[in-house]
């Protein structure tokens, strides 16, 4: 009876953990799809805290990012909010950047990846809290804007794939600087991030990263549904409030990551 009781407790514990993951994946997808993000910036440290190795947590987070942004992009494309002419060159260069980032991730110490992740999360949090309003736009021809966007997208893709963030935190401000309206920047960012995160995920698979298929299936389904809810309601929500809450969460995550390294 005792081994049976232990087995039941183990199953219940595993089920509760899975339900918690599904719930969190859904909430993250709802909130982040409203901001043109995928959620990998939170998924990566979250899975890492659950005991998943960082080089396994990153590709899982990137794939969930793909599901979230792809789900949201379906809605944004139907509503014609995506600026395809600007997005396509940025997608092309960000793919190569993401592949480069996944390659570098397997060449450096994992502690360095966590430190880099902490630094980028801190920068992202401070940017949202104190520099959320861009207020500037590049004064250049359309061809120059496309060139600037494409070059910058390469570096965003490389860094995002290296540390396991979606990249939308930096992609949205870039698109605003390039002259897009906020709604179009959010929608276009989600579209670009879909391909960028998918490339990073594929890059990690090429280096034999292990994946928890059960976790991916359930969390992925939750992320897809959550992104549909978020993308269809984001026009009715005050994104400034969500941004500030998100920034505070990021700074908390930074503190926890750094504390874990000490």
Image (tube, helix red, strand yellow):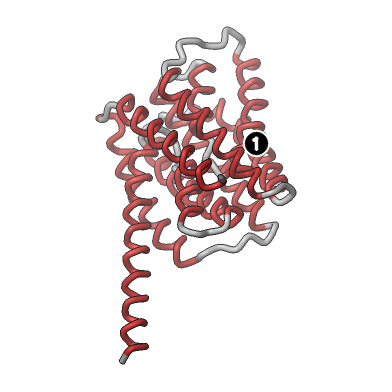
Residue reaching furthest left?
236
Query: Number of callouts in the render?
Result: 1
Q: Quadrant of residue 118?
A: top right
Question: In the figure, 235 relative to 137: above or below?
Answer: below
Residue reaching furthest bottom?
1
At x 52%, y 55%, the residue is 60
At x 55%, y 63%, the residue is 211
For this rendering, which residue is in front, 208 or 258? 258
In the picture, measured across the screen, residue 182 lies left or right of residue 158, that is left
The quadrant of the image that shows the C terminus is top right
Q: Tell me the element at label 1.
A: helix
Question: In the figure, 1 relative to 77: above or below?
Answer: below
**Where does the image place residue 50, in percent across and percent down from the top left?**
46, 58
Q: Quadrant of residue 130?
A: top left
For this rendering, which residue is in front, 247 or 77? 247
In the picture, measured across the screen, residue 91 lies left or right of residue 130, that is right
Residue reaching furthest front?
262
At x 66%, y 51%, the residue is 203
**Where does the image place residue 84, in percent across and percent down from the top left?**
52, 30
Residue reaching furthest top?
139
Q: Quadrant of residue 159?
A: top right
In the picture, measured across the screen, residue 242 lies left or right of residue 54, that is left
At x 29%, y 29%, the residue is 235
- Is residue 69 in sight in this rendering? no
For this rendering, which residue is in front, 12 or 236? 12
Within 10 Å of disc 1 (Cα), the crowding (few <14, some 14-19, many 20+) is some
- Is residue 236 in sight in this rendering? yes
**Where does the image place residue 216, in percent across and percent down from the top left?**
46, 60
The quadrant of the image that shows the N terminus is bottom left
**Where does the image place residue 183, in percent across and percent down from the top left?**
38, 25
Q: Which residue is mark 1?
A: 92
């Amino acid at each position: 009876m005792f081994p049976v009781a232990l087995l039941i407790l183990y199953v219940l514990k595993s089920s509760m953990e899975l339900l918690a993951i599904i719930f969190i994946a859904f909430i993250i997808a709802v909130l982040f799809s409203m901001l043109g993000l995928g959620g990998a910036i939170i998924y990566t440290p979250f899975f890492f805290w659950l005991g998943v190795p960082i080089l396994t947590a990153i590709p899982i987070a990137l794939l969930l990012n793909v599901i979230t942004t792809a789900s949201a992009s379906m809605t944004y494309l139907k509503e014609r909010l995506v600026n395809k002419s600007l997005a396509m060159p940025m997608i092309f260069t960000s793919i190569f950047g993401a592949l480069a980032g996944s390659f570098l991730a397997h060449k450096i110490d994992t502690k360095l990846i966590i430190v880099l992740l902490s630094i980028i999360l801190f920068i992202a949090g401070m940017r949202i809290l104190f520099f959320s309003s861009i207020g500037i736009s590049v004064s250049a021809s359309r061809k120059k804007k496309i060139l600037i966007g494409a070059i910058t997208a390469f570096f965003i893709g490389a860094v995002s794939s290296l540390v396991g963030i979606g990249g939308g935190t930096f992609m949205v401000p870039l698109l605003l600087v390039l002259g897009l309206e906020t709604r179009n920047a959010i929608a276009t960012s989600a579209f670009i991030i879909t391909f960028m995160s998918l490339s990073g995920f594929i890059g990690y698979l090429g280096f034999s990263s292990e994946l928890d298929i059960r976790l991916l299936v359930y969390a992925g389904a939750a992320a897809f549904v959550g992104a549909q809810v978020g993308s269809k309601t984001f026009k009715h929500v005050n994104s400034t409030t969500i941004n500030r809450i998100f920034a505070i969460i990021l700074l908390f995550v930074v503190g926890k990551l750094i504390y874990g390294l000490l």
